[in-house]
Amino acid sequence: MTAPWRSLALQPAILMIIGAYPAGAQVIQVAVERPLAAELGLSIGDTVRLGTRIDSMTSSAVVAAIYEPRPDPAEIAKRERHIRLHLPDLAALLGAPDRVDRFGVGLKPGVSPDSAAIVLNRGAFGYRVHVSAALAAESSQTFLVVSRFHRAIAVITIVASAVFLLCIMLLKVEERRLDAAVMRFIGVRRRTIFSALLLEAALVAVLGSLAGTALSYVAGSVTNAYYRRFFDTGLIFSAITHEIVLFSIALSLVLGLLAGMLAAWRLVRTPPLVLWGRG
Amino acid sequence: MNDWIWSIKSLARRRLRTLLAVLGIAISAALLFDMVMLSGGIEKSFADLLTAKGYQIRLSPKGTLPFDTEATLPAANSIIRQLRQDPAIAAAGAVLGTSLYGRGPDSLVTLFGYGIQPEGQGLYWLQAGSDLAPSDTNGVLLSSAAAGLLGAEVGDTVRMVGRLDPQVITGSVDRKLAVRGLVRWAYDYRGQPSVGTVLPVMQALAYGNREDRASLILVKAKEDRHAPALAAALRTRFPDLEVYSVADLVAVFKQRLVYFRQLSYVLGTMSLIVSVLLISTLLTITVNERLGEIVTLRAIGVARSTIVRQVLIESAVLTVVGGVAGLILGLGTARYLDSILTSFPGLPAAFSFFVPRRESVSTAAVVLLSAGCLAGLYPAWVAARAPIAATLRSEAT
């Protein structure tokens, strides 16, 4: 590739210019992530120049690999672009030889990470040893907060749905005033009318739950398709598990039955003549 | 006036269903108001935070956002000198952010250090003691969290340690500093132990060899309205630096929190739909129940438009009462939801997600009222088109 060159800033502070490298210059290898390669039209074998400042793009590099970045929920919103270099090449590029941000330590089978961390931290000076599980827990704090927020929104939605359901059930049962009055006139017992109305409420709740479940699968698929495209990632944004479906159906059944009971109870304790409109 | 009284009496006749409808609308409206506060609140709160000290422009290393990486820009003092000579600039100050250690009562504690230029600082508010003088190389400012960790008060002396060298088991730089004051840092998260010194002291603690580097430069334009033009001019003047106006940073931040904005749109729309469905269903059933009464009114000469008006007024009354209750409920739930979201790790303590703004809340109220009135259109149509003779005959049997 030749001029016109394009420059690109990469985190933390590496600049990249796409173009030809001078003959005879030492060339390092670089792996470029797939979205970045697609954005810049790079393919394997292309050359780029790297540097920490725009006026000192001295290192030439050849694209040795294009890799698919691992889906990471912590990274998607940042829309940062990454390249990978061999450690000595990056250290030389940054002018910080023999310095690293962190080490990864693999323990022999049977060694407890917590005890190893305690032992290493005892002699630590200028560094701190963390267990991977603790780091994972800490870095997932953001998602725990999002999860708490979703739960709070869900509670508000459930309360609104419960009121809506109660209102609809009440209206639906009220519509049956004349039927209930006739049944009472011909000697049908209150308990039978109550049970019939309750059964009807349960049926409505079951049908509503099934429709809601189907709707949630559609909404989940749309959400996943939209955000995967939006963030160019393979992450799952909406996961409808069996537990969620069962919980939702059980909740709507309970709410539906409670609403039906309340409405039916109001109806059966009203005198039949009042129900008939002559009381 | 009669229409209003008639409609209110009609709603009062069915107290339980009216109460439930109002409650349902109130909860939906609360969610709608919350989502409106969330959608605009993020950018409002962030913009307020950025301009809290009046600095409208930030310069950071090329390709980075302010304090997003550990990258620094070289020749900070030279850039500052150039900026301060610009007649359009009221103030400019460099900031270096770095991690360092302080000697606590029994161990080293990790701190965040700000190197600042007191004559051009837009990062903190003094809470106790005195500010640093520009030439004060022996003083330090502490956040209350840092003061707690170090067990220090104003007037005490604390020891700050720069980079630790594991090979020789010693701190490469060690400084004794007098605590001049306690400050609240604008961008610190809750409980962040931060300290501030003049820039050269922090540069020495961070690099040992007094490299003239800074993480960020803050620029205050003489007039707010000239800030975007000044940012554009600085972009041309310093091509090696990233120049951000407040609007640029808000746009980046909005992009990062796009999920919450979209969620607010989806949930806001859904709550509006639920309100419309609730009002429409309730009024349709009520109108069907009262068809006999309605056609009797028509039969004695009441105009069709009067019937339509009365049904629409019922729907407006339900919406207004539910909406007012929803606004009160929404303000309460917004505080609760805000307390959840502001517990995001690393988020500045002064940041809010749910910001009640008069214009956005008014817009939401108008949209809710319009939707509520629209919801009454179908039942009003049912009431208006009921055939008089057939309905009266069916009611009589």
Image: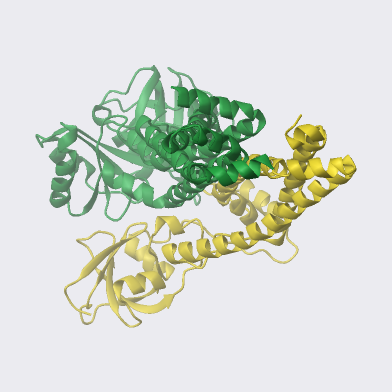
Chain colours: A yellow, B green
Name the side, left or right, on which A191 lies relative to A116. right
How many discs appear? 0
Residue B111 shows in this picture: no
Q: Residue at x 37, y 43 (%)?
A: B206
Residue B208 shows in this picture: yes
- The percent coordinates of residue A274 (x first, y second) are 76, 32
In depth, the one of B297 and B165 nearer the eye is B297
In depth, the one of B241 and B282 nearer the eye is B282
Q: Taking B254 as reference, is B324 above or below it?
A: above
Q: Taking B24 as reference, is B136 above or below it?
A: above
- The percent coordinates of residue A196 (x first, y second) are 82, 49
Q: Taking B387 as reference, is B338 above or below it?
A: above
Q: Taking B276 as reference, is A222 above or below it?
A: below
- The percent coordinates of residue B285 (x first, y second) are 60, 42
**Quadrant position of the N terminus of chain A in the picture:** bottom left
Q: Residue at x 62, y 39 (%)?
A: B289
Name the side, left or right, on which B95 lies relative to A181. left
- The percent coordinates of residue B103 (x first, y second) are 51, 32
Q: Residue at x 69, y 45 (%)?
A: A172
Name the quadrant containing residue B66: top left
Name the side, left or right, on which B249 lies relative to B230. right
In depth, the one of B116 and B312 nearer the eye is B312
In depth, the one of B330 and B157 nearer the eye is B330
**Quadrant position of the C terminus of chain A in the picture:** top right
